[in-house]
Image (spheres, rainbow, N blue to C red):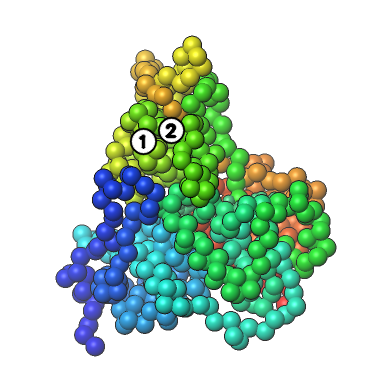
Amino acid sequence: MPDKTFQFLNVQRQTPRTVPVAIRVLGYGEIAGDFGSSQAGQQAERCIDCGNPYCEHACPVHNYIPNWLKLVQDGRLMEAATLMHETNPLPEICGRVCPQDRLCEGACTLEQTAFGSVTIGSIERWVTDEALRQGWRPDLSGVQETGKRVAIVGAGPAGLACADRLRRAGIAADIYDRQNEIGGLLTFGIPPFKLDKGVVRTRREVLEGMGVRFLLGHEVGRDIEFGQLLDDYDAVFVGTGAYTYVDAQLPGRELHGVHDALPFLIGNTERLLRDDPPAHAFDFRGKHVVVLGGGDTGMDCNRTAVRLGAASVTCVYRRDEANMPGSAREVKYSREEGVEFLFQRQPLAILGDDQGKVRAVRVIETALTDDGHGRARPQNVPGTEYEIAADVVIQSFGFLPSPPDWLRSHGVELDRSGRIVTGKGASLPHQSSHPRIFAGGDNVRGADLVVRAVYDGREAASSIAGMLLV
Ligand SMILES: Cc1cc2nc3c(=O)[nH]c(=O)nc-3n(C[C@H](O)[C@H](O)[C@H](O)COP(=O)(O)OP(=O)(O)OC[C@H]3O[C@@H](n4cnc5c(N)ncnc54)[C@H](O)[C@@H]3O)c2cc1C
Ligand code: SF4
């Protein structure tokens, strides 16, 4: 075998081609293209097998990255897919939506050089897509059914990952979700240009093939009592997400033309799933849109507004670009699609006309000082206020957990911001203060990332299996 150690000198880092801007903004199709098998193999060969895989440490699910890159180099697609699933129940989804620049690829040894990191996320995506297309499915033939049963509340990534692991341990997994489709924010929050909904549907087939049962259109607390789940099952995993909007209390937020990010994105995705044209509130043709907030959700709002026909989209953020919470890739895509960024501007108020419609946002410039923890703190600069004309304003300031009442009434401890407390004083990781209730994902961490929800679901399943199968 030829030594591939210095392959990175000859083969440049390449990401899959993206759809040209002029075409992509006309619709909602995924903008990132696919690797072909030879391109994936070549990119995998760029791994220098550095001996201390920082990528693996930085990946929240600790994927065996160098090991599966080696399998891809050798053309062993199915084995690579199997190895990927050992640590990550949703690899094709993480390969698409993880902010790799802040995680695995940001930590790649080659990233510290002029050559640029291995394209880990795109390879993970390609392997899983291609293996599933060729018929790869998890092999559960050696699994012995234990007769134990677990109810999962929430079919988001935390719940799905938990179900995958439980089935591999021979434990029945029934997932209840109030929505009529699985995926949580994968389906209803993250726009289709980042994650095609067909990808989530394929994953549903895989999970159903593993014996996972979905009870959709069932809101726990309304259609079925939580206490009933505790009576009927050996344990319950709660993965209900974070849906409480952070309200910056901006004057004028009640004006016509002001949207909150999540209802805006969910509403648009729901209408796309129904194949409906944009309702009046979503008809942005010819309008000037201002998005407030610099996180990933803000970037999704920017790019959705572009696709809804906005005449201009301006994203206002109170810190500078280096301190944005959003992924650099999403900022780049937003820019390519015509979004203008206004950094170091603090919104003060939304202004309306005499018919109660938005006409502008008043902002003030900020100066950045060190907050003592390495994060820039924005401070308003007196005398720098001005107005930005706007017909539509989308507020995207983040989300907090929305703990259902039934958690507290069953003795589950929450912290002051409504997050479920796990692990504290409990004997098992991800166990709540009730010994048979486990939790993970955004309802424990606050709004976070898909891959961290996957990690929580996976690890909670391992705790549940440890408890039930002793
Ligand atoms: C617009 C947007 C874009 C994002 N983009 C990215 C991205 O690019 N990359 C990334 O890594 N992360 C992204 N995130 C974050 C990511 O989507 C979340 O961190 C992740 O989905 C959390 O997973 P979860 O399983 O904890 O919760 P969720 O995905 O929110 O799933 C919770 C599920 O619980 C269900 N549920 C809640 N209450 C009940 C009840 N009482 N009964 C039955 N069902 C219930 C809900 O219907 C939902 O299906 C984004 C988030 C948003 C809002
Ligand atoms: S799961 Fe995310 S962080 Fe981990 S290797 Fe895949 S893309 Fe990178």
- Please provide percent x and percent y for residue 123: 35, 68
Residue 219: percent from left, percent from top = 71, 51
Q: List the residue tagged with mark 2.
A: 283
Q: Is residue 85 left or right of residue 154?
A: left
Instruction: Tell me if mark 1 has few (under 14), some (14-19) or many (20+) residues whose alpha carbon lies within 10 angstroms of its own.
Output: some
As rendered, which of 237 and 430 lies closer to the eye? 237
Q: How many marks?
A: 2
**Residue appearing at x 56%, y 57% in the figure:** 183
Say what amino acid the circle numbered 1 marks.
Answer: Gly
Q: Quadrant of the C terminus?
A: bottom right
Residue 340 versus residue 264: which sits nearer the camera? 264
Q: What kind of residue is marked 2?
A: Asp
Kind of element beneath mark 2: loop
Query: Can residue 387 be seen at all in this image of the molecule?
Result: yes
Describe residue 453's horizontal placement relative to residue 316 as left or right: right
Q: Quadrant of residue 49?
A: bottom left
Residue 372, can we see it?
no
Please tell me which residue is depicted at 51% across the width and 17% down the height of the picture.
356
Q: Is residue 51 above or below residue 122?
A: below
At 37% from the left edge and 63% from the top edge, which residue is drawn? 121
Residue at the top extreme of this rendering: 354
Quadrant the N terminus occupies: bottom left
Residue 369 is situated, as x and y percent measured from the top left of the image, at 39, 32
Q: Residue at x 50, y 14 (%)?
A: 355
**Label 2 near label 1: C-beta < 8 Å?**
yes
**Residue where numbered disc 1 is placed:** 309
